[in-house]
Amino acid sequence: MTSDELYQQYASYLDFLGHTSETCTQYLRIVDDYLYQSDGSLTRDSVLSYMRKYESKSGTYRRWIMYILKSLFENAKQEWPFAKKELPKLSKPSQPYLKISDAEHLIEIAKSSPLDYALVRLDAATGARRRELSEVLVEDYSRPYIRIRTAKSGEARTRTLDSETCRALDRYIRQRHSKSPYMFVSSQGIHLTPQTLSIRFRKLAQKAGFKSGTGWHSLRRGVVTWLFEGGMRERELQEAMGWKSPTMPSRYVQLVAGKVEEKVIATHPFFKKENADGRKTRTATTRPR
């Protein structure tokens, strides 16, 4: 059948099932888009190709798209080319994260405001979640330590701060002028909620020229990546970042292909032997007679 015939047949099928007009519109939009891209070809490869449009979406959303396409195949009496509940493993794009140079750039921009400077500096030092920043109390800070109350299922942790981050917090506290028990408040003394923190970060990110979607969690991912590249491993990262599950670090570390390859070359015994042999050869040829 042609793309138009498949589309019309599927529209009649949805009408027969009695779906609401809103549901029909959603399903038909997906089916029309897929048939246009695949030119009416109902194959595994065409589905995989189409699903790449949604590789940045959540697994739940992609399963919903797959469900719609599966119903199209079944209505056209075509065998669905995937196992039950199988979700194509697509190349997952890296989540936005800040390199150390990005974080330093953001910190420079935040310096004009004691509040923003303290917030960004503290987050870059600890990798705290947005809600954790919001819930820091004045009593949680005792130079050079700060207690981070974990927003999720992990445990609270005490982190040691570098001297510049301490100076940023001290400067902010001196001009804070609020009786609120919460550390971070507005100029009117109102507690800053996670939503308010997002707005502040978005403005700083725009000034820094960062792409849309860069938020507090981008800085958290960056911190995890910096620590991993510095030699910390999963169990240590789990403790430092306040995770309950030891599998969480692997979801946050942003591996750079070039750096991974450099580490393979530096670590693999074949390269080590090759480098050692090369040193021996150079030593033999350069030794004075």
Image: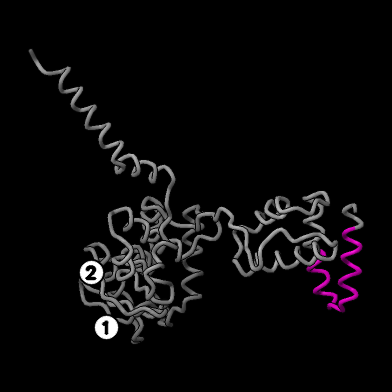
Q: Identify the mark at residue 219; answer none if there is no mark.
A: none
Q: Which residue is mark 1?
A: 139
Look at 86% across and 77% down and name the residue there.
17
Above or below residue 116? Residue 91 is above
Q: Marks 1 and 2: which is nearer the front? A: 2
Q: Which residue is mark 2?
A: 160
Furthest residue to the left? 289
Task: State the extent of the magenta-drawn residues as a range.
Answer: 6-28
- Taking the magenta stretch, the answer to whether it contains residue 121 is no
Residue 107 position within the rendered picture, expressed as x and y whole percent measured from the top left: 37, 58
At mark 1, the secondary structure is helix
Look at 80% across and 74% down and name the residue there.
23
Residue placed most toward the observer, 133 or 261: 261
Residue 77 position within the rendered picture, expressed as x and y whole percent measured from the top left: 84, 62
- Taking the magenta stretch, the answer to whether it contains residue 27 is yes
Do residues under tags 1 and 2 come within 8 Å of each other at their CB atoms?
A: no
Magenta: main secondary structure:
helix
Look at 68% across and 60% down and name the residue there.
82
Look at 56% across and 53% down and name the residue there.
91
Tell whether 60 sits left or right of 6.
Answer: left
Furthest residue to the top? 289
Q: Earlier in the sequence, mark 1 or mark 2?
A: 1
Quarter-of-image position of residue 29: bottom right
